Amino acid sequence: MENVQNMTIKQIKDLLQDGSLDAQMEECLLTDSRQGVRRLLEQYTKRVERQRVLKEQWERMSIHEKDLRKQGYGLIAGMDEVGRGPLAGPVVACAVILPEHFYLPGLNDSKKVPPAMRESFYEVITSQAIAYSISFVDSERIDEINIYRATQIAMRECIDKLPIKPRICLVDGRKMTELGVEQLALVGGDGLSITIAAASIVAKVTRDRWMAHAAQKYPEYGFDQHAGYGTPDHLKAIAEYGPSPLHRKSFAGVKEWFATKR
């Protein structure tokens, strides 16, 4: 092995980017007096630690899938929904079946993943998934039957729309009735299961894109900024312009406007 004292900082940088260090090389770098080398080693150490943390997180979030496979379950779906709380737009559900050896470090509940990373994860999940499906229930239907029932309908439709039927479905939240497939409900499941987390990412990105497109038709509400949630700017826009056809008339923050018009 070439003595690090004879290596340029660029050579050391390339070395650290290409692979992991053995103990001897790391010891040599620790004794190198060059500030540039010290910075590179510090960055490398942080990167390795980050990878270790993400791997441990992945192992924790894979426990349910591994246990189910040990019990003989092959195709395992994860399902989640987004859009219960917004004042406008649809509720969106997603079901995903991932390959057994799928690995996407950093995958987590969509609320804990930055937007740019969600977009990147969406592309990986949808391109590598064995199967996935997405279902929408619009604001008009939500007003007719309430958000809880609308969410249940969206999630059941996802199972029906999957081109491959799973043996079991991991569901975020409480156990559902009439899902049409065996299920395991996990409260807070989008932070406990990689399969539910994957569904959470796909549902979130899908809905955010839908709301961004809606913003082109109704620019005064800023749907691309808040995705329909009741932010101060959104409430101000409702007060100024009145609700759009996409608003949920039964929701607080919207229904008050109609009450003033009676």
Image: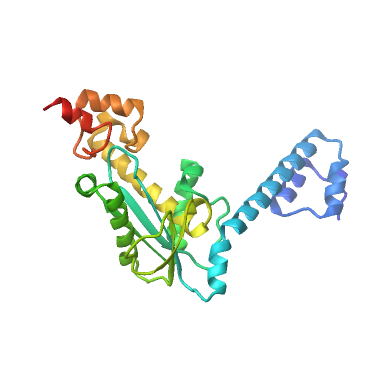
Q: Residue 160, located in which quarter of the rendered image?
A: bottom left
Q: Residue at x 28, y 52 (%)?
A: 149
Task: Kindly tell me whether residue 82 is visible in this rendering.
Answer: yes
Q: Which residue is nearer to you in this view: 86 or 212? A: 86
Quadrant the N terminus occupies: bottom right
Q: Which residue is nearer to you in this view: 166 or 227? A: 166
Residue 116's spot in the image, x, y percent? 47, 42
The vertical placement of 41 against 182, above or below, is above
Q: Residue at x 31, y 35 (%)?
A: 223
Position of 257 compared to 200: left or right?
A: left
Q: Residue 228, located in which quarter of the rendered image?
A: top left
Residue 75's spot in the image, x, y percent? 46, 71
Residue 44's spot in the image, x, y percent? 72, 45
Q: Residue at x 71, y 41 (%)?
A: 43
Position of 166 compared to 41: left or right?
A: left
Task: Kindly tell me whether residue 101 is visible in this rendering.
Answer: no
